[in-house]
Image (spheres, grey):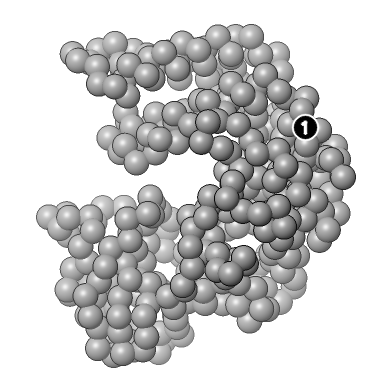
C-alpha cells in the first residue's frame, strides 16, 4: 500500500493524520508521536493523549477489512480475560479510522519488555506454551465471532527444484552487481551451501497433502516482538494481523523455533521441551501431529528465501539479520532432525 505522505520520513506521523485519528477515537489533546522502530511491517507510534498513553498503528501489512476483523476479535479476547490490548472504539463503533485511503487503529499502551525466548526461565517457557493453548481454545469458542473451522487444510510444499531455481535467481542477481558488499559476499556462499543441502535432501519433502492434526484459528506470528512480558508473565500479545486458520502444530513448532533459536543458530532444546509440554497441558495433540509439523517447518526453512526477496526484490534490508541467523539454524537443524523431532514430543 502506498503512503499518502511519501515525502515524510518513515518515523514521522503527519500532524493532519494525528489530529484526525484523535478526533475519530475521542482522544482529546495529543502530544508528540514517538515512532517505535522495532516493528517491521506496520508503522507504530507512542502518543500521549487526554485519554491516556496510546499506541497508534498505521495499517500497511494487511488490507483494512482483514485488520478490522482481527481487531474486533482482539476485543472479544480481552473480554475473555486473555492478555491483549483491546483496540479503542470510535463513536461510530468502528475500530479502524480510514483517512485518505489509509487505515489507523488505536490501542492502550501496555508497559512491558520484549524478551528473547532464550532469556525466559524454564517455568516461563512452560507458561508461554500453556498461554498459546489457551488462545487456541478461546479462538475456537463460538462467541468469539470467527467462522467455525470444518475442514482440514491442504499444506503447500515447495518442490526442491523450485527452490533450486530461486537460489539460482539470486545467484544471478548477485553476479550482475558491479561491486559486492558484505551481505552479497556472505549470501553468495550461503546460497551455494543451500543448493548443496537441497540437492542432498530433495527426497525428504513432506507430502503435498493435508497437514496432520487439529486445525483452528491461530495468531500466526508469536515472535518476541509481539509479546510483552512483565514480572515473569505475558501481559500483552500484540499484532493480530496474521490471524488465520492453520494446523495447531504449525503454530506450536513455529513459535518454539522463533522464540528459542539462540544467537549461534541452534534451538534451546530445554525450553522447547517445556514450551511444548505447556501447550499440551491445554490442548490435546498427538506426537505424530507435532512430528509432521516439525518436518514441514524444516522443509519450509530449507526451501524459503523470503528474506532475500525483501533484500533484492523490494530493496528492504530489515530482515537481513534473519537471513543470516536462519542459515545457521538450518544447517544445525538438518544435522539433528531426529533429535528435534524427539524434543517436541518429549514428555
The number of discs equals: 1
Nearer to me, 285 or 109: 109
Q: Is residue 154 above or below residue 197?
A: below
Q: Quadrant of residue 4?
A: bottom left
Seen in the picture, residue 54 relative to 135 is either above or below; the reply is below
What x and y, as percent, mark residue 88?
44, 81
Q: Nearer the viewer, residue 175 or 48?
A: 48
Residue 281 percent coordinates (x, y)? 83, 58
320 left or right of 31 in image: right
Q: Position of residue 98 (x, y in %)?
A: 33, 72
Residue drawn at x 45%, y 16% is 191
**Residue 219 versus residue 182 in the image, above or below:** below
Q: Residue at x 37, y 54 (%)?
A: 38
- Which residue is at a point 17% across and 74% down the rendered structure image? 16
Residue placed most toward the observer, 179 or 167: 179
Which quadrant of the view contains residue 179? top left
- Position of 1 relative to 309 (above/below): below
The residue drawn where x is 30% and y is 38% is 316
Give residue 211's position: percent from left, percent from top.
Answer: 75, 39
Is there any visible trace of residue 275 in the rendered image? yes
Identify the element where label 1 is drawn.
helix
Q: Is residue 215 visible?
A: no
Q: Quadrant of the C terminus?
A: top right
Which residue is the site of mark 1? 341
Amino acid at each position: 500500500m502506498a503512503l499518502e505522505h511519501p515525502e515524510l520520513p518513515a518515523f514521522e506521523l503527519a500532524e493532519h493524520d494525528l489530529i484526525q485519528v484523535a478526533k475519530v477515537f475521542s482522544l482529546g489533546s495529543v502530544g508528540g508521536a514517538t515512532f517505535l522502530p522495532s516493528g517491521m511491517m506496520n508503522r507504530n507510534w507512542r502518543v500521549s493523549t487526554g485519554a491516556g498513553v496510546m499506541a497508534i498503528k498505521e495499517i500497511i501489512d494487511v488490507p483494512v477489512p482483514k485488520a478490522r476483523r482481527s481487531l474486533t476479535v482482539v476485543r472479544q479476547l480481552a473480554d475473555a480475560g486473555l492478555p491483549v490490548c483491546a483496540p479503542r472504539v470510535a463513536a461510530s463503533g468502528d475500530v479502524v479510522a480510514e483517512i485518505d485511503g489509509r487505515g489507523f487503529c488505536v490501542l492502550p499502551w501496555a508497559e512491558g519488555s520484549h524478551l528473547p525466548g532464550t532469556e525466559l526461565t524454564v517455568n516461563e517457557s512452560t507458561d508461554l506454551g500453556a498461554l498459546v493453548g489457551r488462545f487456541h481454545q478461546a479462538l475456537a469458542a463460538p462467541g468469539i465471532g470467527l467462522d467455525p473451522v470444518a475442514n482440514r487444510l491442504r499444506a503447500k510444499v515447495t518442490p526442491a527444484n523450485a527452490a533450486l531455481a530461486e537460489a539460482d535467481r539470486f545467484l544471478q542477481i548477485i553476479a550482475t552487481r558491479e561491486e559486492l558488499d558484505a551481505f552479497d559476499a556472505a549470501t553468495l556462499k550461503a546460497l551455494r551451501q543451500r543448493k548443496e543441502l537441497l540437492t542432498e535432501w530433495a527426497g525428504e519433502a513432506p507430502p503435498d497433502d493435508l497437514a496432520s492434526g487439529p486445525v483452528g484459528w491461530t495468531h500466526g506470528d508469536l515472535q518476541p516482538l509481539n509479546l510483552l512480558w512483565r514480572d515473569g508473565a505475558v501481559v500483552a500479545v500484540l499484532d493480530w494481523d496474521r490471524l488465520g486458520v492453520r494446523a495447531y502444530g504449525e503454530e506450536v513448532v513455529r513459535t518454539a523455533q522463533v522464540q528459542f533459536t539462540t544467537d549461534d543458530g541452534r534451538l534451546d532444546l530445554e525450553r522447547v521441551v517445556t514450551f511444548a509440554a505447556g501447550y499440551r497441558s491445554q490442548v490435546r495433540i498427538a506426537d505424530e501431529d507435532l512430528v509432521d509439523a516439525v518436518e514441514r517447518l524444516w522443509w519450509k526453512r530449507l526451501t524459503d528465501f523470503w528474506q532475500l526477496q525483501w533484500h533484492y526484490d523490494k530493496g528492504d534490508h530489515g530482515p537481513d539479520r534473519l537471513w543470516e541467523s536462519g542459515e545457521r539454524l538450518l544447517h544445525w537443524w538438518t544435522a539433528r532432525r531426529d533429535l528435534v523431532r524427539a524434543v517436541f514430543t518429549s514428555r
